[in-house]
Image (cartoon, rainbow, N blue to C red):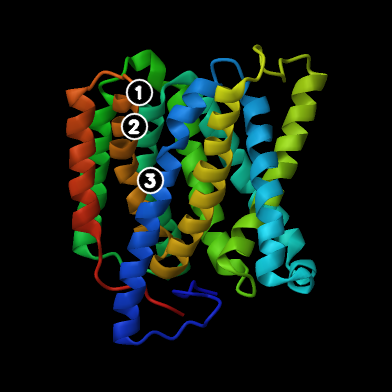
Amino acid sequence: MAMSPDPVRGNVLTVSGGRTSAVSGNGLAVASMLTWAAGFPAAEVLLQSWPPVALFAARLVLAVAFLVPVWLLIDGPSRVLRARWGHALFVGGTLGVGMFLIIVAQKLTDPVTVAIIASCAPLFATLLELATGTRRLRWNFAVGLVVSIVGGLIATSAVAPAQLGLGAGCAILSTGLFCWASMATARDFPDLSQTGRSTITLVGGLIVAAFLFFAAGQAGMDILPSAPIDVQQMGMLVIYALVSLGLSQVLFIASVGKLGVALASFHINIAPFYVMLIMLVLGEEWNWTRALGASIVAVAVVLAQDRRVPRRA
């Protein structure tokens, strides 16, 4: 079944309704990327003393612990119990693997690099929508894809080649898994609220996190922070878990429900601007090559914004 602009309310669009959906969908996507970008500098601080598997688990625990009570209040206990838990755990597990890989990628590279590599998300998402028949590939969208890739290549050329190996591979694989899981989350749980759709799949991600945490401990790997957890780390963890994951995911899934995963994912390409600005405030040096690449990506985002919503089944 193809995605509807709002799967809860049905899949019939009027012209005015489509325009309203596009405006609100883009607004939700912008808000999602702003909150998501805040997590990169937070993770950069935490990864100085937290092993990736420990940070991954702590992030999911905090986000799920906060979102589940909110979900119960919004949808009610009966709807929560009747939800498609089996499918949700599979989708959430896929999302969880992608989330872990993005943490590993940032550990091996840096926050701006990971955000820029994630600009391949529109390509993955567009292929997914073409495969499911929910989008026609129009010229402006195709040109936007090409321009976006060019911008990403220019931006990543500012990083030493050694940083683009395994870390880049993890980021690319993570992005593909994230796109599929986001599409499935918005499409496959029409009886749940936007908060419910995000929360039920994050529970699946938490199961993956628990498994990886246990496996890492059994393998003798470091699974605890190497430094005492202070107030600064707790603050960074709250930003990373509740803002950059919990709030951002709810907003992004809501955007996917209105725009489709391809158009929504184009907003990921603007995240490097937000990350760079945040890092600049924190004392990071400005990099003109990255700025040029990110600017080209921004042009691609504008160019590829299709005024029409994807075809609906």
Closer to viewer: mark 3 or mark 1: 1
Helix, strand or loop at disc 2?
helix
Residue 72 percent coordinates (x, y): 72, 64
Bin the neighbour count of mark 2 within 10 Å (Cα to Cα): few under 14, some 14-19, many 20 and up. some
Residue 190 percent coordinates (x, y): 60, 73
In the picture of the structure, the residue carrying the numbered disc 2 is 278
In the image, 35 versus 179, the foreground residue is 35
What's the CA distance linking mark 2 and mark 1? 6 Å
Bin the neighbour count of mark 3 within 10 Å (Cα to Cα): few under 14, some 14-19, many 20 and up. many
- Tell me if residue 125 comes above or below residue 110 in the rendering: below
> Is 46 placed left or right of 292 in the picture?
right
Q: Amino acid at mark 1?
A: Leu
Q: Which picture quadrant has residue 63?
A: top right
Circles 2 and 1 in contact, beta carbons < 8 Å: yes
Q: Amino acid at mark 3?
A: Leu
In the picture of the structure, the residue carrying the numbered disc 1 is 282
In the picture of the structure, the residue carrying the numbered disc 3 is 34
Helix, strand or loop at disc 3?
helix
> Is 37 placed left or right of 186 in the picture?
left
Furthest-right residue in this view: 218
Q: Do we see residue 169 in this rendering?
A: no
Residue 306 percent coordinates (x, y): 25, 66
Q: Do we see residue 233 in this rendering?
A: yes
Which tag, 3 or 1, sits closer to the chain's start?
A: 3
Residue drawn at the location 73% of the way across and 71% of the way down: 76
Helix, strand or loop at disc 1?
loop
Furthest-front residue in this view: 231
- Tell me if residue 308 comes above or below residue 181 in the rendering: below
Q: Amino acid at mark 2?
A: Ile
What's the CA distance linking mark 3 and mark 2? 10 Å
Residue drawn at the location 74% of the way across and 72% of the way down: 79
